[in-house]
Amino acid sequence: MSASAELFAIATSRLGKRFDQIMALDGLDLGVARGIIFGLLGPNGAGKSTAIKILTTLLDASGGSAQVAGFDVAKEPVEVRRRIGYVPQLLSADGALTATENLNLSARLYGLRGAERAARVRDALAFAGLDGVADKLVRTYSGGMVRRLEIAQATLHGPEVLFLDEPTSGLDPVARHTVWDRLLELRRSRGMTILITTHDMEEADVLCDELAILHRGRLAAVGSPAALKAQVGPEADLEDVFAHFSGAVMDQGGRFRDIRESRGTLQRLG
Ligand SMILES: Nc1ncnc2c1ncn2[C@@H]1O[C@H](COP(=O)(O)OP(=O)(O)OP(=O)(O)O)[C@@H](O)[C@H]1O
Ligand SMILES: [Mg+2]
């Protein structure tokens, strides 16, 4: 394992993906330290889901390279798959099955057997807070319960790196908090590295140790929520950061430094 693989759970180098005329990813360089919750932000179409699909070996890149958990996604996809969990943007649990049945399916997929499988499924139900409804059909669950089940399914095999594509979109504030709580628990108790995408700036601020903002397949900014806010201005919140790095200012062709300086000037004058 290289030195960078020891430091980084995820590393990409000039990663590119072209769909016909669209450059969905355009030379993305990203390093995600081990054991943190990392948020990938960016407007619709920025390339977030494309990046996740390449990192989870579901899609081939058209340029550059990426390592996950120390292995190359293109050259060693089986090693990568063993070490990751993935919760996709669209629902993945089967509504016609119970929570126990969904978990048993995932456990079988990961090659877990016998007493170990039963124990892992039991732990996963407790982790997801679904013990009491384990034998009810998932289609009767609330959105938050389904998401917690999906997180439990994706982590049954104890992955090093967990990818979640918009895990809380469409959830009410209480359900959203129960999902955050489960992700914080995975980081705390298992030292898991977690990469999420989100359009929710509160979620990015509260949950993530570090953020990257994608814009048209390129990295527009990277840093802790506090560092990014400080870059934009003394009063800036993450909504300002998002608008600054991915919004109209960039489309008008302004360079970051110019914008920052003019904002600073306005603030001094104002
Ligand atoms: N299979 C595909 N074929 C053609 N174009 C695609 C395909 N998948 C994605 N794209 C295009 O690539 C770009 C990036 O899409 P992607 O889904 O990665 O964005 P995203 O950041 O996840 O957006 P959202 O916030 O809406 O989920 C978009 O322009 C999209 O239309
Ligand atoms: Mg997406």
Image (tube, grey):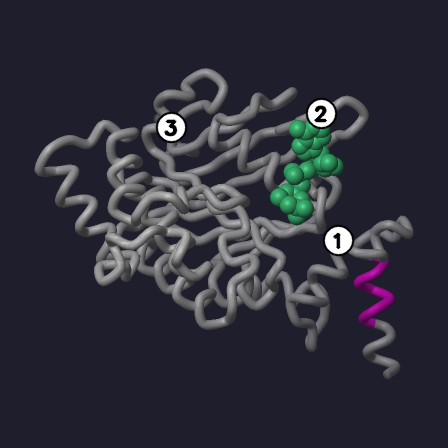
Q: Is 45 above or below relative to 67?
A: below
Q: Amino acid at mark 2?
A: Arg
The crowding category of the residue bearing disc 1, from other C-alpha atoms within 10 Å (few below 14, some 14 to 19, many at least 20), is many
- The answer to whether the residue labelled 2 contacts the one labelled 3, judged by CB atoms less than 8 Å apart, is no
**Of 124 and 59, which appears nearest the observer?**
124
Mark 3 lies within 8 Å of ligand 1 (Cβ measured): no
Disc on the earlier residue, 3 or 1:
3
**Residue at image coords 39%, 66%:** 178
User: How far apart are labels 2 and 1 at the CA level?
Assistant: 20 Å
Magenta region's main secondary structure? helix
How many numbered callouts?
Answer: 3
Q: Which residues are magenta?
A: 258-264
Residue 24, image x, y percentages = 71, 33
Q: Secondary structure at mark 2?
A: strand
Is label 2 within 8 A of ligand 1 (CB to nearest ligand atom)?
no
* Amino acid type at image mark 3: Arg
Residue 18 circle label: 2
**Magenta stretch contains residue 107:** no
Give the label on residue 194, or none. none
Q: CA distance from mark 2 to mark 3?
A: 23 Å
Mark 2 or mark 1: name the one nearer the start of the chain: 2
Q: Classify mark 3: helix, strand or loop.
A: helix
Q: Nearer the viewer, mark 3 or mark 1?
A: 3
Q: Residue at x 13, y 45 (%)?
A: 119
Residue 82: image x %, image y %? 32, 29
Residue closer to the observer: 92 or 26: 92
The residue tagged 3 is: 81
Quadrant where the N terminus lies? Answer: top left
Evaluate whether residue 162 shows in this view: yes
